[in-house]
Image (spheres, grey):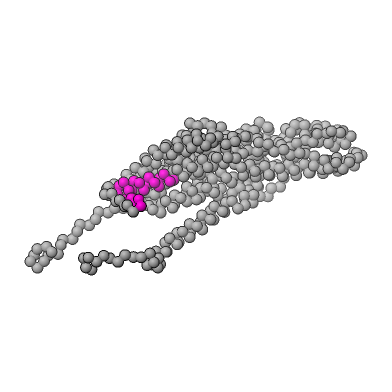
């Protein structure tokens, strides 16, 4: 080729007509779209159908009364009947408790709702059956909700409790209506209608949360911010370190900069990125709290604990991402995205309760980081930072995640270093120039 002739530049049309350019992106993008669709939609399509042992409290505060000469406790009959009703799919875990126990478990996030038969229930129902007593008060069964458990979880549990309470009232009404002819009592249409469904149902908040709590969703979105800060921060740090060490080029618009390569082992590079991820998690977690609590006014208590937990949670995610990037290179970012985002979101139990997820997602929730972190944030924000409300497990799983990330990441990089699998190999020395006929180099 003549010295003054430039090589022919490829055109976009020529590149696009090359099948090899299409193969890898087509396969990866297609698989990614399919897997994301299956993962995200598979967990939300039928929460009621996948319901499994949702914890709901049952409280009988009725002392009973003497009805027709016999001691009777209708409250005990109702709660026992609900608890022992056939449930082939084991959708509900009814927990028979006293009032104090139910209130305690609502405040710890261990119940999604609670159904309570009030004191004097038997006497009030007996009075309804006496048609000669005008002005009898219709007794009320109360359902206590728990918005801190999440809006959908509380709604599902409330719906189940309402259905059970209404069924119990109709069953009781059938017995009352059937007893009227035996008592020789005459009732008008309004009284018969009242006796057919004698118990009113009232829904009230059992464990209130603040008005600026997003109906129980702030814990999920706050956790998502911590995870995204750790994930994106780790990716940015890893790329920035590679640029600074000369292993990657920096491009800004048309400008491209390539620094001289710094000889450094994979293990040392991972140590740098891990230290930076931990250090910058202090900044990102502080800014997240400033934005959410200080600027937007999110309801939050135990702020020092929330800050410390946020820093540790974001740092743990960052270390996990750095380990995957160090072990798998460029594909490690895709793997990290699935581990910390794609599989973590639908199995977190923060939007749809774990008891309403398919079995696959409930298994994932045992180790996926989003579930552990959201439980800890929820415990701090809504349940007075009680260890039994998920905070202890969250701290434990953060520690496990940090240890696993460090062991895996440094184990892989040290293995690569020992095998001589360096990121940049030394260039071969140039071959000696060809000699001319006179013995001088050409």
Q: Residue at x 29, y 53 (%)?
A: 424
| Any part of residue 407 in sight | no
Q: State the predominant SS element of the stretch in magenta.
A: helix
Choose between 417 and 224: the one closer to the eye. 224
Quadrant in which residue 172 is drawn: top right
- Vertical arrangement, residue 20 with respect to residue 407, above or below: below
Q: Is residue 1 left or right of residue 346?
A: left
Q: Residue at x 41, y 44 (%)?
A: 233
Which quadrant of the rendered structure holds the C terminus?
A: bottom left
Q: Residue at x 48, y 42 (%)?
A: 225
Quadrant in which residue 388 is drawn: top right
Q: Is residue 167 left or right of residue 412?
A: right
Q: Position of residue 104 (x, y in %)?
A: 62, 32
- Range of magenta residues: 231-253
Q: Position of residue 59 (x, y in %)?
A: 70, 35
Choose between 338 and 93: the one closer to the eye. 338
Which quadrant of the rendered structure holds the N terminus?
A: bottom left
Q: Is residue 239 magenta?
A: yes
Q: Position of residue 386 (x, y in %)?
A: 55, 33
């Amino acid at each position: 080729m003549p010295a003054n002739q430039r090589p022919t530049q490829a055109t976009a049309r020529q590149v696009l007509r090359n099948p090899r350019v299409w193969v890898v992106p087509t396969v990866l993008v297609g698989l990614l779209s399919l897997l994301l669709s299956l993962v995200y939609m598979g967990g939300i399509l039928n929460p009621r159908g996948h319901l499994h042992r949702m914890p709901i409290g049952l409280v009988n505060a009725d002392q009973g009364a003497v009805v027709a000469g016999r001691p009777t406790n209708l409250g005990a009959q109702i709660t026992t009947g609900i608890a022992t009703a056939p449930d082939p799919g084991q959708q509900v875990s009814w927990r028979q408790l006293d009032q104090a126990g139910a209130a305690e478990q609502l405040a710890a996030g261990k119940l999604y709702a609670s159904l309570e038969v009030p004191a004097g229930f038997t006497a009030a129902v007996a009075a309804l059956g006496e048609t000669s007593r005008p002005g009898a008060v219709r007794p009320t069964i109360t359902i206590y909700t728990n918005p801190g458990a999440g809006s959908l979880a509380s709604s599902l549990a409330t719906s189940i409790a309402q259905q059970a309470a209404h069924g119990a009232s109709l069953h009781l009404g059938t017995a009352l209506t059937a007893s009227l002819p035996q008592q020789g009592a005459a009732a008008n249409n309004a009284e018969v209608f009242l006796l057919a469904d004698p118990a009113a149902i009232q829904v009230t908040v059992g464990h209130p949360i603040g008005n600026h709590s997003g109906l129980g969703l702030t814990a999920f979105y706050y956790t998502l911010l911590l995870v995204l800060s750790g994930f994106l921060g780790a990716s940015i740090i890893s790329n920035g370190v590679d640029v600074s060490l000369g292993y990657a080029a920096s491009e800004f618009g048309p400008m491209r900069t390539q620094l001289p390569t710094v000889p450094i082992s994979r293990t040392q590079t991972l140590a740098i990125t891990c230290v930076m991820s931990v250090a910058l998690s202090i900044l990102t977690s502080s800014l997240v709290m400033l934005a959410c609590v200080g600027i937007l006014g999110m309801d939050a208590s135990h702020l020092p604990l929330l800050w410390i937990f946020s820093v540790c949670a974001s740092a743990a995610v960052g270390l996990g991402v750095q380990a995957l990037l160090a072990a798998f290179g460029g594909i490690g970012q895709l793997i990290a995205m699935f581990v910390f985002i794609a599989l973590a979101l639908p199995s977190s139990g923060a939007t749809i309760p774990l008891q309403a997820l398919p079995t696959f997602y409930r298994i994932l929730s045992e180790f996926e980081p989003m579930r552990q972190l959201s439980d800890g944030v929820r415990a701090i924000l809504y349940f007075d930072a009680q260890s039994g409300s998920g905070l202890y497990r969250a701290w434990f799983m953060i520690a496990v995640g940090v240890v696993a990330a460090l062991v895996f990441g440094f184990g892989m990089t040290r293995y690569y270093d020992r095998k001589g699998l360096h990121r940049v190999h030394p260039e071969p020395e140039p071959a000696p120039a060809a000699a001319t006929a006179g013995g001088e180099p050409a």
